[in-house]
Amino acid sequence: AQKITQTQPGMFVQEKEAVTLDCTYDTSDQSYGLFWYKQPSSGEMIFLIYQGSYDEQNATEGRYSLNFQKARKSANLVISASQLGDSAMYFCAMSGTSGTYKYIFGTGTRLKVLA
Amino acid sequence: EAQVTQNPRYLITVTGKKLTVTCSQNMNHEYMSWYRQDPGLGLRQIYYSMNVEVTDKGDVPEGYKVSRKEKRNFPLILESPSPNQTSLYFCASSLQTGSNQPQHFGDGTRLSIL
């Protein structure tokens, strides 16, 4: 069955340092999409970055990059130069498996950036 | 302003009293979806719609109904709410149906079923 696993319930990082949030996924499909979303304490969901399963290069969006290792079925989010405003819950998600357009989310990682 | 609008934002109600949470998007998006968020469980998809009159079940559809009669609206209906449906609900949409489409989320609806 398709599944997203985020094994880090909570993490701390010092301001200005880089941090990696882990995400592994399980699917037997060849074509799928992987996403990261941010949920600040205010509650809204914000799209951060996307990686397609056929994309050979890792996706980057500003300070966000996605470390995609297809053979290991991992799609880790790297945040460089952490800022206090990066403190939030982060969700990894997958779509397009099993010929459907379901979205599957992980359980999330709560990141706290320390001043 | 491009947005997904959910109403109400907060609702406290009682078991068995039918309720509808509305969702509307002004971006002419093709794909719309409902999720519930519970502590420790992340977001779980309830239903999604790939276009008008085309809907399909997500992972947790039991106890919910949806309809997509117009492209912009995708209401979530709880015919007989129960306490285990107390949750934070999100509506989301994306431009097209496809595995490469990021979701645009509404601000959420917090439902409490007593």
Image (cartoon, coloured by chain):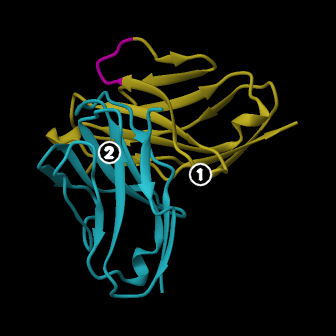
Number of residues whose C-alpha sits closer than 10 Å to that of mark 1, classed few (under 14), some (14–19) or many (20 or more): some
The x and y percentages for residue B72 are: 27, 43
Q: Quadrant of residue A79?
A: top right
Q: Any idea which chain is the yellow one in this picture? A: A
Residue A63 image-quadrant placement: top right
Callout 1 amino acid: Gly
**Residue B60 at x, y percent in the picture:** 29, 64
Mark 2 or 1: the one toward you: 1
- The structure residue drawn at horizontal position 45% and vertical position 49%, both measured from the top left corner, is A106
Q: Residue at x 27, y 53 (%)?
A: B74
For marks 2 and 1, the one nearer the N-term is 1
- Indicate the chain coloured cyan by its letter: B
| Residue A53 in sight from this viewpoint | yes
Q: Range of the magenta residues?
A: A52-56
All told, the count of numbered labels is: 2
Name the residue beneath numbered marker 2. A103
Quarter location, residue A61: top right
Element at label 1:
loop
